[in-house]
Image: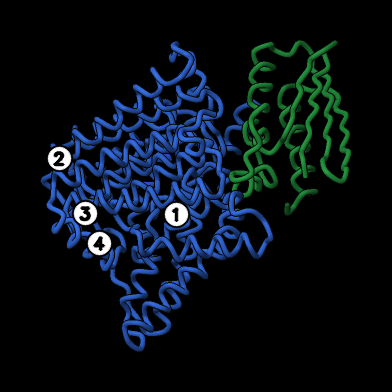
Chain colours: A blue, B green
Amino acid sequence: MKKYWGKIYEPYFFMLLIYLFFLCIAFIADTPQQLWEGLKAIITSRSVLITDYIEIGGIGAALLNVVLVGVLSIIMLIRSDVKPHGAVIMALWLTTGFSFFGKNIFNMLPITLGVWLYSRWQKESFLQYSVVGLLAATVSPVVSEICRLPIGGNYISILIGILTGTAIGFIFPIVTAFCVRVHDGYNLYNMGFAGGLISSFVLAILSSAGYTVETASIWGSGNNFILAVMLYGVCVFLICIGIFAGEKKDILPDLKEIMRHPGRLATDFYIMVEHSSYVNMGIMGILGTTVILLFGWDLNGPTISGILTLIGFGCFGMHLKNTVPVMLGALIGAYLNHWEMDMPSNVLAILFVSGLAPIAGRFGWIWGIIAGVFHVTFVIHIRFLNNGLNLYNNGFAAGFVALLLVPIITSLEKERKKR
Amino acid sequence: MKFMVEKCTQILSDLVLYCYGLGATRLQMDLVPAEDQTTLVLKADIDQLDPDILERLSRDLKQDRQKEVEEMYWSIVYDSSDPCEPTTIGMMLDNVEVHYENNVLIIEACRKN
């Protein structure tokens, strides 16, 4: 694999270019003073679902947070000598996306430290846990929330918050490895499922101790033009990488090859078709952005996060053929339920239902649509189990939907084939 | 490396399930554990295996070993009702050879401990 300056693998280099692009927009959008104030507001925010960092700190500060988190993640990967496969690239995009809402330079570190300590405990290289180390930050609002609780003074609260995050990071690799068995790999957001279980226990403990955790509803709007230009710009850049950076010039057979796969965990498109997977990532990003704009919804921190998640999984299991049916199902579900279709939970569910894409990929588009309807119905209710302490809440819900649907579908399909 | 034995036996059992799905009528397997690596050999009698399927299987299994992913997803192989994606097995193996001769599919794989 090509390296730049002897150390930086090509996919990391491309990510760094995107961060540079974000940094330029940040400095164009806000003054250095505004960036600093905004970043402070982001780091000291509660960060529970739904906390839009663009609304809290402004576009510039949110982008600066994204760049700081992203660059730190890449440094960690380079130092651990992690070769960028599909899962690693996906984890970087998810980290980037959730740095727009909920994950910041302060609340992610204790959890990553916990994962590192677990690797030491197991006497194994951190390389093996690097992806978990990045994605475990799904529960980073736990750190922010505990740091703000009135537990014996500010510094004690902060210390307890950091220690709790480290403890969660320590057990995260164990829980996540087990969780994947529950849904047989049909929920791409497995970390969200593990994070949902852990954060539900944390909420239960906090409630038992007499502390209350309220959900948030900070949802920005009015930035569609600049954010759409930014997102489409990123997608076009990814497609250009796919077309021009690789040795192969014929992309279509590779896209066909990608779409042949159901996308169940763990399907690594980057290993299969290398640069062509970037074209798929760009297409997924265009799909997400266009859906939001087509319905006149808001591009903001949370929805950007959903779009960047689609991009990330464009090299690790998602493609148009398996994602469109579940999104269509989620749209139908959102239309049918009695809430407004543009309610934040509905909008996010329509983007993040993509975690169930392998159901459509493996069992066909009808089951995909059914899964989508189930998901959007279920996700609204499951949030109250952890009150926004788990950022990948849709992954938590998708785990239950897959757990319920996959055995039913498998059984019905087997019977149908027998006949 | 944790769960070495479990991972090897489950890789083999998943390959058996996969070959069964391709219509295998007879299956033979070898698992040879050694100090530094484990060798797995599976022979499956399959009539007229589609060359496209053979090519895809070979390509999917011949992935780079991905230790950072293996730790998270190997339990799909361990405890799945369906055969998992061959790519998932491929990322747990160091070297793989896939042949098809005289209606026998032979998969030889090596996994460093």
Q: Is residue A400 visible?
A: no
Q: Quadrant of the C terminus of chain A?
A: top right
Lateral position of residue B64 relative to residue B29, left or right = left
Give whichever of discs 3 and 2 has the lower sequence position. Answer: 3
Which mark is on residue A224?
Answer: 2
Distance from label 2 to label 4 (Cα)?
21 Å
Q: In percent of the image, x 41 and y 27: which residue is there?
A: A278
Mark 1 vs mark 4, foreground winner is 4
Q: Secondary structure at mark 1?
A: helix
From the image, state whether disc 3 or disc 2 is nearer to you: 3
Tag 3: amino acid? Ala
Residue at horizontal 62 percent and vertical 31 percent from the top: B87
In the drawing, what numbered circle is on residue A42?
A: 4
Are the residues at dot 3 and dot 4 in contact (C-beta closer than 8 Å)?
Answer: yes
Disc 1: which residue? A396
Task: Give the quarter of the figure containing the N terminus of chain A.
Answer: top right
Q: Give the chain letter at badge 4.
A: A
**Which residue lies under the disc numbered 3?**
A61
Give the spatial CA distance, label 1 vs label 4: 25 Å
- Identify the secondary structure beneath mark 3: helix
In the image, B95 versus A79, the foreground residue is: A79
Query: Which of label 1 and label 2 is nearer to you?
Result: 2
Q: Earlier in the sequence, mark 1 or mark 2?
A: 2
State yes or no: discs 3 and 1 in contact (Cβ < 8 Å): no
